[in-house]
């Protein structure tokens, strides 16, 4: 759920891992 690379989406904390 979301790109693996850190992009400003719904995730506040920067994560390089895929936001599954």
Image: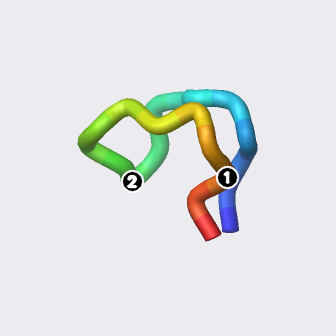
**Of 18 and 9, the residue lying toward us:** 18
Locate residue 18, reporting x and y percent.
67, 52
In the rendered image of this protein, does residue 19 appear above or below residue 1? above
Locate residue 15, reporting x and y percent.
47, 37
Q: From this viewpoint, which residue is outermost toward the front? A: 17
Answer yes or no: do the residues labelled 1 and 2 have beta carbons within 8 Å?
Answer: no
Q: Residue at x 67, y 56 (%)?
A: 2
Q: From this viewpoint, which residue is outermost toward the left? A: 12
Disc 1 target residue: 18
Q: Residue at x 73, y 45 (%)?
A: 3
On screen, residue 2 versus residue 6, left or right, reads: right
Q: Nearer the viewer, mark 1 or mark 2?
A: 1
Disc 2 target residue: 10
Count residues near mark 2 (Cα–Cα under 10 Å), then give few for <14, some for 14-19, many for 20+.
Answer: few
Please, what secondary structure does the residue beneath circle 2 have?
Answer: loop
- N-terminal of the two: label 1 or label 2? 2
In the rendered image of this protein, does residue 6 appear above or below residue 2? above
């Amino acid at each position: 759920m979301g790109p693996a690379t850190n992009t400003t989406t719904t995730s506040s904390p920067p994560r390089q891992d895929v936001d599954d």
